[in-house]
Amino acid sequence: MRTVRIAATITVFELVFAFPFALWLAKYARSPSLQALTLALLTVPFFLSIAARTIVWRAVLGIDGPINNALLWLGVADEPLRWLLFSEFAVHLGLIGPYFPTMVFPIVLAITMIDDDLIAASRDLGAGWGYTLGHVVVPLALPGIVAGVVFTFVPMLGEDVVPALLGGGHVTLLGNSVHSSLTALNYAVAAALSVLVLGAMALLIAMFALVMRRAGGVAGAFEALRQ
């Protein structure tokens, strides 16, 4: 339950920030150089070890880290905040960066495929930006949104590096339990726990297929209206 709660929280957080970022990148970042640079920056982390990216947070969030030193210098805290590291807060923070690109890329692809004429037609017919966003952009980008949720939520169910490095043994997730069971040669428990991940993945993929089928009908209706 802790794993599902943390994974769901991070997925919602990623979606809230990734959708407007993807909308800007797909429709408003008109400079090809800016788009290429942004996509490159989102891609670079995939070439780095997640352990190498995560271990940096231990120095940043530690007792003698820059955050605690800044809080002490500003007088916000009387002593170093020990809960910044080896806590659920640290695990949440460590999961945000690695899974942001997995949420952004599918949404960017979906929004890029939306015809600009549909957005322009909605505005010309008197719809405000909020109405256009809710009734044109979001329905047509729904397959990308669902794909981003799947690509973000499911891998986090098996995440074990970030909790091990930033949880300090106090935040054990499903992936850590599977790894511990394999280390102890307890393959039956490891297999049983892995079935939970596979079941969640199958459920989300089925939901993705259903949304894709319905979104295809919405996209077809908009295309017919445009023509």
Image: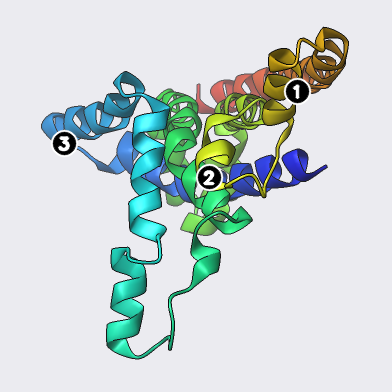
Q: Quadrant of residue 114?
A: top left
Tell me: 83 left or right of 9: left
Q: CA distance from mark 3 to mark 1?
A: 33 Å
Tag 3 near tag 2, CB within 8 Å: no
Please tell me which residue is depicted at 40% across the width and 59% down the height of the picture: 61
Q: Which residue is mark 2?
A: 14
Q: Quadrant of the image for the N terminus? A: top right
Assess disc 1: are there few (<14), some (14-19) or many (≥20) residues with their C-alpha within 10 Å of its C-alpha: some
Image location of residue 47, percent across then percent down: 30, 19
Tell me: 33 left or right of 218: left
Q: Which residue is mark 3?
A: 34
Q: Is residue 41 visible?
A: yes
* Amino acid type, callout 3: Leu
Numbered disc total = 3
- Given this view, does label 3 or label 2 mark the residue nearer the observer? 2
Q: Residue furthest left?
A: 33
Label 3, secondary structure: give it. Answer: helix
Q: CA distance from mark 3 to mark 2?
A: 22 Å
Q: Is residue 16 visible?
A: no
Q: Is residue 95 above or below residue 52?
A: below
Q: Is residue 226 above or below residue 7?
A: above
Assess disc 2: are there few (<14), some (14-19) or many (≥20) residues with their C-alpha within 10 Å of its C-alpha: many
Please tell me which residue is depicted at 42% across the width and 41% down the height of the picture: 97
* Amino acid type, callout 1: Leu
Q: Which residue is mark 1?
A: 204
Assess disc 3: are there few (<14), some (14-19) or many (≥20) residues with their C-alpha within 10 Å of its C-alpha: few
Image location of residue 36, percent across then percent down: 19, 27
